Amino acid sequence: MENKMIGIVGGVGSYAGIDLIKKIYDLTGATSDEEHLPISMLSVPHKVTDRTKFLLGDTTINPGIAIAEIIDSLLSNGSNIIGIPCNTAHAKPIFDLIKARIPENCVLVHLVEEVGLHLSTQYPEIKKVGVLGTTGTILAKVYPEILSKYGIEVIQPSEEIQNLFVHPSIYDATYGIKAFSNPVNIKATENLSMAATYLSRKGAQAIILGCTEIPLAIQYQEIESSLIIDATAVLAKALIRESKKQVAELA
Amino acid sequence: MENKMIGIVGGVGSYAGIDLIKKIYDLTGATSDEEHLPISMLSVPHKVTDRTKFLLGDTTINPGIAIAEIIDSLLSNGSNIIGIPCNTAHAKPIFDLIKARIPENCVLVHLVEEVGLHLSTQYPEIKKVGVLGTTGTILAKVYPEILSKYGIEVIQPSEEIQNLFVHPSIYDATYGIKAFSNPVNIKATENLSMAATYLSRKGAQAIILGCTEIPLAIQYQEIESSLIIDATAVLAKALIRESKKQVAELA
């Protein structure tokens, strides 16, 4: 009756990886060390090209190549269920390559599909959401394409809001979350809150934190009349479900 | 000029493992994903018997057996430098078994030796310290034996303080840190602060947080006239040093 091991592709980004693990622990409800689920994380960030840079054409090296190698290594170390705590890696040009390169029977949880599933089962009244993410995620239309299957319309920031406020909050070397994760720079938090407010006032019933760096900055549950949906927490729940589901199947 | 991969024995305890990784990231000073050091963590807590239970004779299964297996797995996955974020696992009956079972050339950083090195180089004026840890760490005299080599005297809590305040703050199922890590229960923080005050008033110039769960509760830098030494942060610094040292040797 062992739970299956969760394998996490770390380093995309680094703090986001441990934020995912923390959320898995938080949602497990263990009262001793032994009750926690088995988890393996492999973080080799110097080998993984930036996902947004690839989608924008600033590098021709698809980060999916390295991510697939990391997944192979996690599988060889005993992991059964894989999660990638990077929304941008779920853009089709990257994710499809990963899928093509890993074993067919690998249970690779799709973060964005899980957000669609979560919204449609837990909040069926929500039909219009806003998404905050990297410019790679926004331009590749990762959320609009997938959530449309669940009958959910996605509002993305304007090009101006995206370029002046959202993307630099993640990437800027002087105040972005990737450079300042602990603590997050107040400017990043303020800029992201402003962008979330913008999406809320444009009619989004919920705001998806669609980059795993963003929950490090935005830790409140609502903004104005919109619910905040933490995609990392949704991934954590899905990984726990898959880890335990296999037990039931084997029992 | 690649940095070598840090392998972390996770799950002992679970939040302590990610606290160590967070401290490695905090101390790295990276401004992009790619600049973070490579890290692998393997956490299979259901396989590792409780370290204190073994030292107290409540189980005959030495947790060092499973820890050595985890280290082998980390090594086979490309890790070069190993850290175990559990002070109690550094008690001789456990640590010696681990050493005997892993390859001789494995760079296994000794958390408690590193605390001795840190104190003697950074704070040569400190000659008397107090230690907060599990009952296993205290009874096995892990800190007194090792720090005596550095000319440092160690004050441990009385049996009463240890059993009524320190150990339950870590292990109690209703308020201990292993059961409530995020957030830590206020009772655990208060009890540990009381024990730290006790050691300070007994003459300790510094208080060592000698259980990796304790820095989750005590996050201030001083108590009364005593400095707080976070053993997990010391381990993080040592792992970074070793990861970078090998680069210099290879260059």
Image (tube, coloured by chain):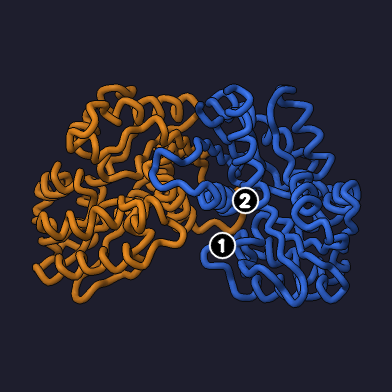
Chain colours: A orange, B blue
Res A162 → quadrant: bottom left
Residue matched to label 1: B181
Q: Secondary structure at mark 2?
A: loop
- Marks 1 and 2 on same chain: yes
The answer to whether mark 1 and mark 2 are in CB contact below 8 A is yes
User: Which class describes the residues within 10 Å of circle 1: few (<14), some (14-19), or many (20+)?
Assistant: many
Q: Is residue A100 left or right of residue B119?
A: left
**Residue at 63 percent of width and 32 percent of height:** B245
As drawn, the label of residue B13 is 2
Q: Is residue B166 visible?
A: yes
Q: CA distance from mark 1 to mark 2?
A: 10 Å
Which one is earlier in the sequence, the residue at label 1 or at label 2?
A: 2
Q: Amino acid at mark 1?
A: Ser
Q: Amino acid at mark 2?
A: Gly
Res B114 → quadrant: top right
Along the line of sight, the residue nearer the viewer: B5 or A1: B5
- Number of marks: 2
